[in-house]
Image: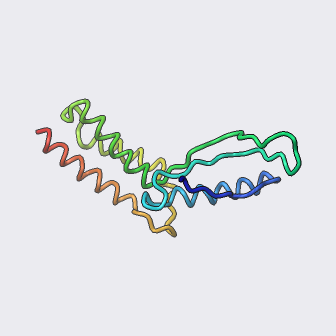
Amino acid sequence: MVPYRTCGVFTKYEELCTSLYEVHKQVSNSSLHASEEGAVLTFILRRGEGSATPDTVISMCKVKSVEYQALRLIVDVLQGAADNSLDELSKDKLFTQFVRDLKVFSRNIDEAFEQHPETFYIDLFSTAHTLLAKKSA
């Protein structure tokens, strides 16, 4: 069974935004162990007690953890390089692409959650690239 929780019922837009910000911060800074890839948010229009009209799902969205996104990025960039024969793309070009893409979502890292720093993922990418280059040589 997939775990779920209710984040609240909101009548004011500001309260919804505050709650969404907190959920995003928690999920994006969670580990793979704690939240796997992340979370799916379901927005439901509540009709209220006694209403003949049922509640309706009005939207859904995914929030991915930074850890998942970083590891997925490593796989995607290196897979792309391997598919295009690693020799065509220099290590510097791949490294630059990875760091640029990593910085797009790593700004969501909150130091209070004690996740891996950016340098952890950069070092991991570099090591994986080196191993892949040796294997294909």
Residue 2 x/y as whole percent: 54, 53
Residue that appears at 56% across and 56% down = 3
Look at the image and tell me in which quarter the C terminus lies: top left
Residue that appears at 27% across and 36% down = 81
Residue 93 x/y as whole percent: 29, 40
Residue that appears at 57% across and 59% down = 25
Closer to the camera in the image, 69 or 38: 38
Image height check: is 81 above or below 113?
above
Image label count: 0
Q: How is the image coloured?
A: rainbow
Residue 123 x/y as whole percent: 29, 56
Residue that appears at 71% across and 41% down = 57
Residue 9 x/y as whole percent: 77, 55
Closer to the camera in the image, 13 or 118: 13
Q: Is residue 112 left or right of residue 129?
A: right
Image height check: is 44 above or below 122?
above
Q: Is residue 16 left or right of residue 82?
A: right
Q: Is residue 9 left or right of residue 19?
A: right
Q: Is residue 87 left or right of residue 75?
A: left
